[in-house]
Image (cartoon, rainbow, N blue to C red):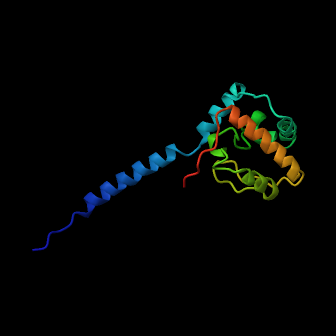
Amino acid sequence: MKKEINWSKYLVIGFFAVGIIAMTLNSFLPGKDDIKDLELTDSGIALPSFSKEAMVGKQLFDMNCAACHGRNASGTEQGPPLMHRIYNPGHHSDRAFYLAVQNGAKQHHWPFGDMPAQPQVSSEQVSRIIRYIRELQEANGIMYQQHQM
């Protein structure tokens, strides 16, 4: 005699398992709540004693990047905060910044749309902007973390 399998029981268990996995993964992804928190804490961003290169980078950032990425890289409604752990050097290397400026970047972490290329910013200027961002991140506890997929 062949035992009949109750598929509805397995379907319900599978549905709940997928839901739990989705909720867990979603809690690790940045979202609009992260953006709101960072905008509200902009005045709380620690400003270090910048190196000379980073001071030049700050001026360049303010002229070319702050309109979208915000004062002190805190983000705006047009662009993501670079003062977020997801932009640590282990996840977004310096090369990623060079490529984003040179070629633009497809939307992938945030709901702001694609970043257009910034041809008015030279490679040397990007280097100084990166120095500013990295010194600012370090002063605020955003350090290298191994990227895990």
Left or right: where does residue 121 sit relative to residue 112?
right
> Residue placed farthest to the top in the image?
43
> Residue at coordinates 87% horizontally, 47% vertically from top-left?
125
Question: Nearest the camera: 146 or 5?
Answer: 146
> Residue at coordinates 78% horizontally, 34% vertically from top-left?
71
> Residue placed farthest to the front in the image?
51
> Residue placed farthest to the bottom in the image?
1
| As drawn, 120 above or below 6 | above
Whether residue 1 can be seen here: yes
Q: In which quarter of the image is the N terminus?
A: bottom left
Left or right: where does residue 64 sit relative to residue 25?
right
Q: In which quarter of the image is the C terminus?
A: bottom right
Q: Where is residue 103 in the image (x, y as percent from the top left)?
A: 79, 59
| As drawn, 39 above or below 86 | above
> Residue at coordinates 31% horizontally, 59% vertically from top-left?
11
Q: Where is residue 99 in the image (x, y as percent from the top left)?
A: 77, 56
> Residue at coordinates 58% horizontally, 51% vertically from top-left?
147
Left or right: where does residue 99 sit relative to residue 91?
right
Q: Position of residue 14 (x, y in %)?
A: 34, 57
| As drawn, 137 above or below 103 | above
Left or right: where does residue 70 sit relative to residue 22?
right
> Residue placed farthest to the left in the image?
1
On the image, which quarter does residue 88 sit in?
A: top right
| As drawn, 114 above or below 67 | below
Question: Nearest the camera: 85 or 25?
Answer: 85
Q: Position of residue 25 (x, y in %)?
A: 48, 48
Whether residue 74 can be seen here: no
Total marks in image: 0
